[in-house]
Image (tube, helix red, strand yellow):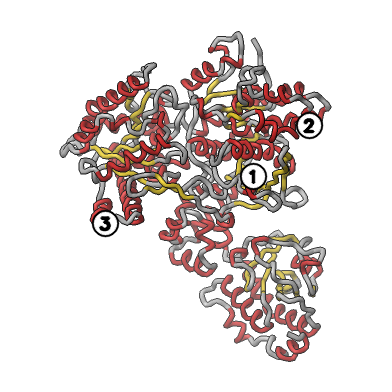
Amino acid sequence: MNPQTTSSAYHGSLLWTLEEISRLVSHSGNAAETLNNVVSLIQQRFGTDVCSVYLLESDRSTLVLAATIGLRPESVGRVRMRLDEGLAGLVGELLEPLVVEDATRHPRFKYFKTAGEDPYHSFLGVPLIDRGLLQGVLVVQTVEPRVFGEDVVGMLSAAGTQLASIVAEARTLRQFVAPSHEKLWALARNLWWSWDDETTGIFRALDPGKWREVDHNPIALLQGMTVDQIEQRASQLVLHGRINYAHRRLQEYLASTDTWGSHNAGVLGARPVAYFSAEFGLHESIPIYSGGLGILAGDHIKAASDLGVPLVGVGLYYDQGYFKQRLDTTGRQQEDYIDVDSRLLPIEPAVDRQGIPVHIDIDTRSGRISARVWKMQVGRTTLLLIDSDVDGNKPEDRDLTARLYGGDSRVRIRQELLLGVGGVRALSALGISPGVIHLNEGHSAFAALELVRQRMELEGIDAFEACRRVAAHVVFTTHTPVPAGHDRFTPDLIEEHFGPLRDHLRIEPHDLLALGRVYPHDPNESFCMTVLAMKLSHRANAVSSLHGHVSRAMWTGLFPGRSDDQVPIGHITNGIHVPTWLAPQMKQVYLRVGGWENVDKADDGELWETHQTLKTRLIEFARRAAAKSAIRRGESPSQVEQLRGALSLDALTIGFARRFATYKRATLVLQDIEQIASLVNDARLPVQFVFAGKAHPHDEPGKALLQQIAQLMRDPRFAGKLLFVEDYDINVGRHLVQGVDVWLNTPRRPLEASGTSGQKVVLNGGLNLSVLDGWWAEAYDGSNGFAIGGGETHTNIDVHDRRDAEALLRVLRDEVVPLYYERDPDGLPRRWIARMKRAIRTMGARFSADRMVKDYVLNTYVPAAGGTSAQMRS
């Protein structure tokens, strides 16, 4: 459109009467709606593609996008710029109109990925001034480059002057960006919400159906709602006070300096812990985890956040995550991989001090691998995620970080190259100099070699001296006593991927291979990541007391001349992040008695009824999930209806959910199928089961076990009394650990390193029924749960399994079932409740992630960072 034509066409129509302006003002008093009316009218009358209002925040130095037509609605409240940056900032800085024919070529142009302004070129901005004070900036933009004439500039300025008083009032009342919308986005972008019941409840209340549909993802929820819809819903449900309170608590949480970490880990403030893990289980909507290792890592960094321990997580960004599980009509597991939309996750590109997105390169003998780095806020902690899906990479390298634990050895070593070497380089690019490197399992051990290279360059020393100095700052946690769980690579794969780095280290191939071998000079031994981690760390630990014994025996070859008890591997028993796994209903019970330490003061009836409420919630969830799966499989209406009524609300409910590795023996309880069927069908004292879990896509024996259990849903003896819930994830796990009466754990001792699922059950009122392995071996005291056997093993696996199956059936029949159904005149199982209380009192604090992280800080992190005031050596 010709500027002169624009001027004459709009002459006399842009200066509105008071009556016209009053029609722009929201009748509901919603300032955000008023501003939306204003930008809509201006955009229409000027015939532009975009009209936006940026308002000055209370600091009088920052502009925030308050309303827009043309830019993405979700950018409202998110796009911010200082007055000394961006074109809108320049308008506010100069206090005069600014016309730019092509904004992208202007030196002050600032690009905001979330705004969606890529197509627009021309820019006209005028300051909004009321009573001599800057209130904001009014901007119009068009797709085609255009030079706005003086008349148009003058008329937009005049319109801005007329509207400035409305803007000033909205700004004074802090209503200019729909505060609820803005604060909800701020809450959604920090994973703190995932362990804050009140904030989660707010998101759920906005649209309960949609909340479930989007897998409890607040960003997906908010992106599916307009500002007006959010404001309307918040008003209907009177959510504004709750939103303000949650937002204020988050800001106070982030700003607090009076934390356990500030008093006990001060040395880490300048040089934090860098916590490397191949997976992080934070929430079901962020699929970068598969099982226990990831859940442990997620709980670790959440607890570090709560305690105020300076820590940065480093992992990989899997854009397809772990697989989605579905069962076919035979009960066979099928795997689906679904691309994850990064726009629906609380991540953003990690940028360096100049604001440039971090990009890393790693050279191999077969070419260069490049990656970008995402950043995620988890409370006070930051999680960095390496992503190889970038331009310039070969197709196979773009897919490197697509799937968790997918592919062959070559894919695995390249993933671990990105995690270890790439992770250290990402930290360096961001200016983060860690005082401690924590390797959570051997997947990330290559990080230590990159640190050696950096130390050589920094201090002018050789590789062997650099190894010694780096090892003093490395903490290594081993998680598996199963030999197959330790990654091993052939010499040719090591040379292909580490040849360039080895050149920098100035060592021979056999010297590099020796770092990953128990017997350095054995050419037939493959390169083991766990061995590399052991050799390049001064502090190594297992994850339970029993696992410590097993690990010391397993790795004696690394320490010739030492007996098992002299091998330098300690243990720090795993724990769980209580706020993530504790049901809000149980939390209220503890609040009334002053904490779980005082659970004996809780009324038996209240504790029991609270547990029954959670159990009902689990059963309803399991029914819905099973029926939904049956509908997907095309099963008959009668079968679907039967599943909708499966399980009894008052039957003893036993849960089993974990990875379907064969050593975890998911079917141990089914060894004597007739005996179990008799327990399940006891009309007076019934027992029922809820199963969940995934088998690795390549684990055929594990899949067979899973199929055996799934098929029992069709067996007349178990129909309606056993359910398998598909696609085990954090959400499924949350329902199970909060609602079961008994948690069943049947690993083949001593192959369970720790396990944490049973720990999650404790505070929610469930009791453990477990083999004395992992954490349970050091937790069971005879009256805080139930033990399967006495900890005996046998060299013959068949004998071992048969003994444990017999012991399991015996303790179920003779102890668990009778105690559960023993009721007093009030209908309460008093002795069962007493056991619940003892479990909570004796294990609640001991097996929490807070205790675990404190142990790491005091026993490994602070010493590794050189922060101990005294340390004597024998």
Measuring from the top left, give residue 852's x and y in whole percent: 53, 30
Dot 1 or dot 3, earlier in sequence: 1
783 sits to left or right of 202: left
**Residue 175 in sight:** no
Q: Quadrant of the N terminus?
A: bottom right
State how far apart marks 1 and 2 are (Cα): 23 Å
Mark in front: 1 vs 2: 2
76 or 426: which is nearer to us?
426
Which disc is residue 386 wearing? Answer: 1
Q: Quadrant of the C terminus?
A: top right
- Residue picked out by circle 2: 504
The disc labelled 1 sits on which kind of residue?
A: Ile
732 or 43: which is nearer to us?
732
**Which residue appears at 24% of the width and 45% of the height?**
719
Asked if 738 appears above or below 30 in the picture, the reply is above
Measuring from the top left, give residue 871's x and y in whole percent: 66, 17
764 sits to left or right of 388: left
Which disc is residue 794 wearing? Answer: none
Measuring from the top left, give residue 489's x and y in whole percent: 61, 30
State how far apart marks 1 and 3 are (Cα): 46 Å
Which disc is residue 636 wearing? Answer: 3
108 or 307: which is nearer to us?
108
Element under label 2? helix
For residue 49, which quarter of the picture? bottom right
Disc 3 + disc 2, Cβ < 8 Å: no
Element under label 1? strand
